[in-house]
Amino acid sequence: MTDNGKLVDDQELLDQMVNDWQSDSAYEESSGGVHDLYTNFVDDLTSLGLAGCIDNRVRGVTAINGCDAHPTRAPHAKLDMNDFINAETKSAVRKTLDLVYEDREAPILPYDLSLADLDDTAFRLCELSGQIAGVRPLSEFKMSDVLKPEYTFTKNGNQYSYPVLYSYLHYVNCARHVDFEEVENIIEIGPGAGRQVEVIRKFHPHINFYLLDVAPTLYFCERFLSATFPDAVIPYRDIREQEQFSIEGVGRIAHLGHGKIENLRPVGQTLSFNTAVFCLMSPVDAERYFRQLMTLANMVYVCEPKRPDCTDIYGIAESACLDDIERFLAEEFDLLESERAIMPLGYKKGFGDFHSAVWRRERDQQ
């Protein structure tokens, strides 16, 4: 299934996951632009393969942090879509971006900064955040190159990318209130490409992971983690039909369709860890997941928007937001902290003002 730490396509596995997804009642949850994103991603994975999807930066891959593109690519795309900037200005901005692309040391940004300066600052801010929280230092993390990163930078002999730094900050924000050495299981709905799992597992290899997602994302995540942790991933085919599922041993990783949450039976201290996923669901669908999570988890970490702006962004009828989640959990969990979500170089902007929040079950604090 793996080839020396490289992504390996498995069309049979993708087809199986897609068939399971489409036959599950949870398939009807996605609508509008979200449904189009998933279905197009299936087509791209089939026609281009994993490597082709990364090389072409298809929407499905970029949406799940599945590629480490050069930092100038997003500004180029936003410039092309902006109708309020005249052609002459766009041309000048493009030349600047091209220069930054060619020379990361060029001091052509405000305050005589270069792209390399921004990389260094982002790393130091994340490292400082980890030191303040008293968690494993970022300098100890060794990033996988399985996803063929287009852009990384080197600190202390290790490679880093922006998605890695962002995942590390999620870990830090949660670890201020959760002792990961005591966590035995993590349930992540919507693990995306699996970058968060990579960060946490390399620091805490004893944790078992239950990962639930829609078929195309689940497939991408399974392929990435199978290449990164080849001895840890439990074959999807072995567990897909189990009516009750509990991971045996430690440090294992299981992938299941998101509709299978009611089948999970984790044993021991369990953390629900979810980022930017419930905002793509209606409040009714999100509540159904939280009703299950409240029976499984002792602690909950989320990063979700305060406002339901995804309703307009993705063209869906309703989108859940942090206020909904607080209402779901209020019966049995205490809110320990809620604050505006940060990125390595600033706040997480757009999509309804994202906040990070941590809850703990009331009885577990006695």
Image (spheres, helix red, strand yellow):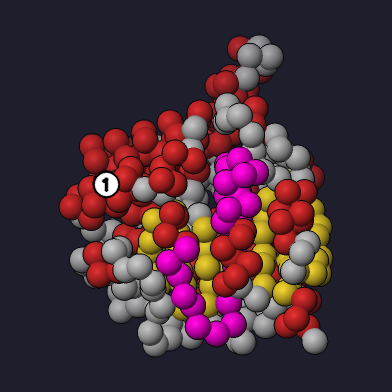
Q: Is residue 282 magenta?
A: yes
- The quarter holding residue 40 reads top left
Please indicate whether residue 96 sits to the left or right of residue 337 in the image: left
Give x and y (percent) for residue 149: 42, 54
- The quarter holding residue 291 reads bottom right
Please tell me how crowded label 1 is: few (under 14), some (14-19), or many (20+) other residues with Cα within 10 Å: few
**In the figure, 116 relative to 36: above or below?**
below
Please indicate whether residue 279 sits to the left or right of residue 61 in the image: right
Please indicate whether residue 283 sits to the left or right of residue 205 in the image: right
| Residue 342 appears anywhere in the view | no
**In the figure, 109 relative to 120: above or below?**
above
The residue that label 1 is drawn on is: 19
What residue is at 30 percent from the left and 79 percent from the top?
A: 231
What residue is at 24 percent from the left and 64 percent from the top?
A: 237
Give x and y (percent) for residue 254: 38, 69
What residue is at 43 percent from the left and 86 percent from the top?
A: 250
Give x and y (percent) for residue 227: 31, 67
**In the figure, 161 relative to 49: above or below?**
below
Q: Judging from the image, what secondary structure is the residue with disc 1 in?
A: helix
Q: Amino acid at mark 1?
A: Asn
What residue is at 62 percent from the left and 59 percent from the top?
A: 290
Assign the N terminus to one quadrant of the image.
bottom left
Assign the C terminus to one quadrant of the image.
bottom right
Q: Nearer the viewer, residue 51 or 251?
A: 251
Magenta segment? 262-289
Give x and y (percent) for residue 128: 74, 71
